Image (tube, grey):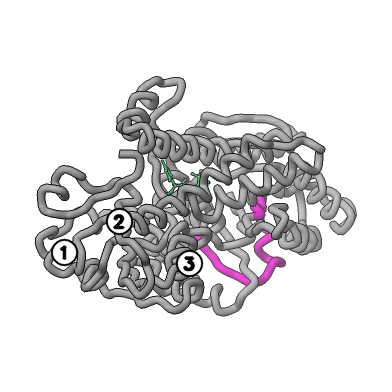
Amino acid sequence: MTITFIGHGYVGLVTATVFADLGNKVWVVGHTAKKIEDLKKGITPFYEPGLTELVKKNIDAKRLLFTLDYDKSISESEIVFIAVGTPPYKTGDAQLSTVFDVSENIAKYLNGYTVVAVKSTVPPGTCKKVYGIIEALKKSGVEFDVASCPEFLREGTAILDTLNPDRIVIGTESKKAEEKLIELHKAINENFVLTNLETSELIKYASNSFLATKISFANAIAKLSELLGADGLRVLEGIGIDRRIGKAFLSPGPGYGGSCFPKDVKALVAIAKDYDYSFSLLESVEKVNDQAKRDIVRKVRKAVGELRKKKIGVLGLSFKPDTDDMRDAPAIDIIELMKRDGALIKAYDPQAIENAKGLIKDIEFAKDLYDCAKDAEALVVVTDWNEFKDVDFKRLKSLMKNPIIIDGRNIYDPEKLRKLGFTYVGVGR
Ligand code: UDX
């Protein structure tokens, strides 16, 4: 099948590449000449394990094509996916202008029956608006349908997630569009959730908001366990074994970050407000998430004392491991709060330093973990990168001014570290 993706962010580029690898001819349409020229050479705009290799492989096989031009790509495609960003306004509402702009462009070049499938996360009702825009601008006689086809891939495991999804959600009012989308996706998984546009659009927000709720619940239980003298990790393990609850997304830490959870929780609160419903549960999820970041800083203060002019090492900047994405990363707020106290921050991350430089000012960046620990009064683990787990603790201790570790991700064994002479503070333990 020939298909087009508008947008080459995490969702657009990864999904397009996977569909090309499955044998389809896939066009990827962008709007920045430099990025498209780079992509044609196999240079990807972000770090994602395995992606560059897979992009190059499919460029060489002539199945993956990059262009700025809507004309050829849209006119020869059976399905056109919209996969552009929907970043939040200050109010939390999703910005939909790019979705609507690309819909106008698509309308002009439709040629023969085409399914326009929206992969971007959009508030319920948006796909119907996309339909209206295309209907008004398309050439007369050209047939099309609109579908909602949300994506659930995670950064860091994006290719694996795209190839092994738990379900494929397709929302449309048209049987013909549904069949086309089933035909394309059945090579991946046949566990389809077939529904209407609004339901499909809401499934994406509900899914991300529920996962964020699990994380905030875990952070609240961890906090309460610290206050009660209970072992929070055992409590969460104990509840997670119940299959109705499930073990996943119950790890307490510095709070959720990234390009989806913070944005989608805020958007769902805003969507509910538009319909005069106060989604207070989700408002609390956000509050707990904010407290989780503040709590890490409170622990640093408690262990180190007054932070003014003290060197603090921060391990991990990206919002989670295996990505260089800094969007809404907890490290940003945690570092800003410590800077406000006058701390001197030196931070290290295996991939995200370049992206962090634009977002966090007046701090030093270390070349590795040991450089980060040098003369530090405390080390704070913010992201659970694998390379932080296997450490020469004796060397670390000899480099630090004070052997204090605030382990925001519970990656170390507290007993082992205490035996080696460290002051160890985790989350919920
Ligand atoms: C998420 C959804 O998982 C994915 O389905 C959707 O398509 C996009 O949003 P992503 O943001 O890439 O994916 O990362 P994810 O692995 O879900 O982690 C999100 C945040 O939650 C990270 O900051 C992570 O560190 C945090 N997290 C996750 C926890 O704090 N505890 C957990 O138990 C799990």
Q: Can you say whether 392 is above or below 115 in the image?
A: below
Residues rendered magenta in the picture: 62-82
> Disc 3 residue type?
Glu
| Residue in view at x 16 percent, y 64 percent | 396
Tell me whether the residue at label 3 lies in contact with that at label 1, contact meaning CB atoms closer than 8 angstroms. Answer: no
> Disc 2 residue type?
Ala
Circle 1 residue: 396
Q: Is residue 364 part of the magenta span, yes or no? A: no
What is the spatial separation of the Cα atoms under label 2 and label 1, in whole angstroms? 18 Å
Q: Earlier in the sequence, mark 2 or mark 1?
A: 2
Label drawn at residue 336:
3
Q: Earlier in the sequence, mark 3 or mark 1?
A: 3
Circle 2 residue: 303
Position of residue 240 measured from the top left corner of the image (x, y, whole percent): 38, 27
Q: Is residue 249 visible?
A: no
How crowded is the residue under tag 1: few (<14 C-alpha within 10 Å), some, or many (20+)? some
Position of residue 26 measured from the top left corner of the image (x, y, whole percent): 56, 57
Position of residue 261 measured from the top left corner of the image (x, y, whole percent): 55, 48
How crowded is the residue under tag 2: few (<14 C-alpha within 10 Å), some, or many (20+)? some
| Residue in view at x 26 percent, y 70 percent | 372
Q: Nearer the viewer, residue 151 or 389?
A: 389
Q: Can you say whether 363 is above or below 164 in the image?
A: below
What is the spatial separation of the Cα atoms under label 3 and label 1, in whole angstroms? 25 Å
